[in-house]
Amino acid sequence: MKIYINGKFYDKDNAKVSVFDHGLLYGDGVFEGIRSYKRRVFKLKEHIDRLYESAHSIMLRIPMTREAMIKEVVRTVKTNNLDDAYIRLVITRGVGDLGLDPRKCYAGPSIIIIADKINLYPEATYKKGLSIVTVATVRNLTEAINPQIKSLNYLNNILAKIEANNAGSEEAILLDSMGYVAECTGDNIFIVKSGQLYTPPQCMGILRGITRDAILEVARKAKIAVHEHVITRHEVYISDECFLTGTAAELIPVVRVDGRQIGDAKPGKLTLELLKRFKDLTKTEGVKY
Ligand code: PXG
C-alpha cells in the first residue's frame, strides 16, 4: 500500500505525521471518504467541492487547486492499482505548537490520501437489515459546529456510536436539539411511506451526504416522489421502509428502530429498487482511471 502525504508516496509503516500536527492535537482539519467502483471514482467532483467548502468554513486554505486535488486522488488509486477502493482524503491544519492558535501552524496543511478497501458491514447485514436505536447524544448544534463541515473532530458521532454499541446496536439515530431526526453517525437516513421517499432537509443540521444526493437523483429519475422534510421518531416507527446511506455503508436497510419493527422487518421493496438503481449509477458515473 502506498500512502500519499504532501506530494510523496510512503509505505504504510512509514506514512507518518508529526505529533504536533493540529489534526491530531485538536481534530483541526477536514476529510472526505470517497469510493471508486470498477476504476471510476464515484462523484469525485462533489467530494472535492465539499472538502474545499468544509476547509473554507474553518479558514483552512488548501494549498492546491481543486483540479490538482482531483488529479492527486486519481494518482493515488492508480498507484495502488485498486479497481474498487475506499479513499480517505485528510487535510489537517498542519504542524503547530501546543497552543491551539491555527495561525502558528506555519508549515501549512498536511494533505493525506489513503486508498484501501472497506467493508463496513458483513454481507448478511445487507440482506437482513440493521436494528438501530435513537441515542441521547444530540447532533452537534449548527450554531456551534455545523454538521455540514466534515471536520476531523468526530467525537459527536463517536459518542453516539458508543451509546448505540452499549445498547447492542450497530448504528445510532441522532436527533437535533428540537428532537427531530437528524442523521446517523456516518450515514443519512431515509424512510418510505405509501410509496414516497422522505429524508431530513439539509437545514436540519445534517451532513448533506453525497450518497443521499445520489439516491434522491435516482429516485427522481425513477419518478418516485421525494420529500426533503422534517421527520419525527414516530414517523420513522410507522414507516413502511427505512434505510441509511453513506459512502462507506452505501445503502443499508433498517428493519428495527428502538425495538419497533419497520414494515415486515425485511429490507423493503423500494429500498432494494433504489439500491439497484444506485449500483447502476456507480457503473456509469465517475472519473475514470
Ligand atoms: N452523515 C455523516 C455524519 C457522515 O459522516 C454521511 C452522513 C454520509 O455522507 P456521504 O457523502 O458519504 O454519503 C457521513 C459519511 C464510516 C464513515 O465509517 C462515514 C463517514 C465518514 C467516515 C467514516 O461509516 N461519513
Image: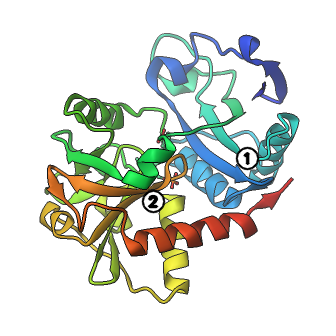
Tell me residue 207's x, y (percent): 42, 54
Q: Nearer the viewer, residue 179 or 248?
A: 248
Q: Nearer the viewer, residue 171 or 267?
A: 267
Tell me residue 185's x, y (percent): 36, 43
Identify the residue at image location x=21%, y=64%.
Answer: 236
Q: CA distance from mark 2 to mark 1?
A: 24 Å
Q: Is mark 2 within 8 Å of ligand 1?
A: yes
Q: Is the N terminus in the top left, top right, bottom left or bottom right quadrant? A: top right
The residue carrying mark 1 is: 84
Judging from the image, what secondary structure is the residue with disc 1 in? loop
Identify the residue at image location x=58%, y=44%.
Answer: 32
Tell me residue 245's x, y (percent): 45, 57
Tell me residue 4's x, y (percent): 77, 29
The residue carrying mark 2 is: 208
Mark 1, Cα crowd under 10 Å, few <14 / some 14-19 / many 20+, is some
Judging from the image, what secondary structure is the residue with disc 2 in? loop
Amino acid, disc 1: Asp
- Checking the image for residue 177, the label placed there is none
Q: Is residue 259 above or below residue 285?
A: above
